[in-house]
Amino acid sequence: MAGKQRILVVDDDPSALEFVTTVLQGAGYRVERASDGPTALKKAKTALPDLVVLDVAMPGMDGLAVCDELRFDPRTRDVPIIFISGQADDDTEALASALDAYAFIRKPFTPEELLSEVHNCLTVFGREA
């Protein structure tokens, strides 16, 4: 059961951002949103999230670069990350794994799929209530 965990959702696609936000809020999670990499980094460093759900393909700073920056900063290096992507391939998944992502979800996905990965991730990292 979701508690007060704070999840940062990052996606440049407004409809995808709204979908993920609605699913997570409906399950009781607190959601912060960002539509680009620099905003995501600022939000993550200002108020440490329990989890980041991060789109891979974004203009400018993509999700892999955001993840790399989060891993480099001592304040955010241990925040778990779940990647989501509609343009996924094996190389991208391998890069995400190398950056220590918890999971990689290919779009389109169901609300149940997302919630299962989020719950499992928060449980593994001791952040689920």
Image (spheres, grey):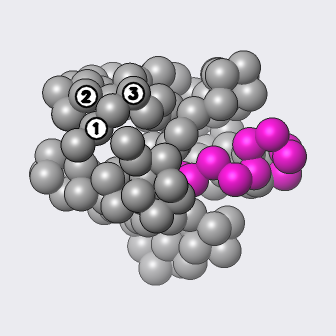
Mark 1 or mark 2: which comes first in sequence? 1
Amino acid identity at mark 2: Gly
* Residue drawn 50% across the image and 72% down it: 93
Magenta segment boundaries in residue numbering: 72-87
Is tag 3's residue or tag 2's residue first in the polypeptide sequence?
Answer: 3
- Residue on which the image places disc 2: 28
Question: Horizontal placement of 64 versus 35: left or right?
Answer: right
From the viewer's perspective, is residue 114 above or below residue 41? below
Q: Nearer the viewer, residue 19 or 52?
A: 52
Residue corresponding to mark 1: 2
The residue lying toward the viewer, choosing from 60 and 53, is 53
Amino acid type for the residue under numbered disc 1 = Ala
Q: CA distance from mark 1 to mark 2?
A: 5 Å
**Whether residue 85 is visible:** no
Residue 14 lies within the magenta run: no
Helix, strand or loop status at disc 2: loop
The CA span between labels 3 and 2 is 7 Å
Look at mark 3 in the image and give the residue it sits on. Answer: 4
- Front residue of 15/8: it is 8
**Neighbourhood count class around disc 2 (C-alpha, 10 Å): few under 14, some 14–19, many 20 upward:** some
**Residue 82 lies in magenta, yes or no?**
yes
Q: Name the spot of residue 37 as percent of width and height, x first.
A: 63, 33
Q: Are marks 1 and 2 in contact (CB under 8 Å)?
A: yes
Is most of the magenta stretch helix, strand or loop? loop
User: Taking 85 as reference, is 101 above or below it?
Assistant: below
The answer to whether residue 4 is visible is: yes
Question: How many discs appear?
Answer: 3
Write the residue at 67% across / 66% down: 99
Q: Residue at x 46, y 64 (%)?
A: 124
Amino acid identity at mark 3: Lys
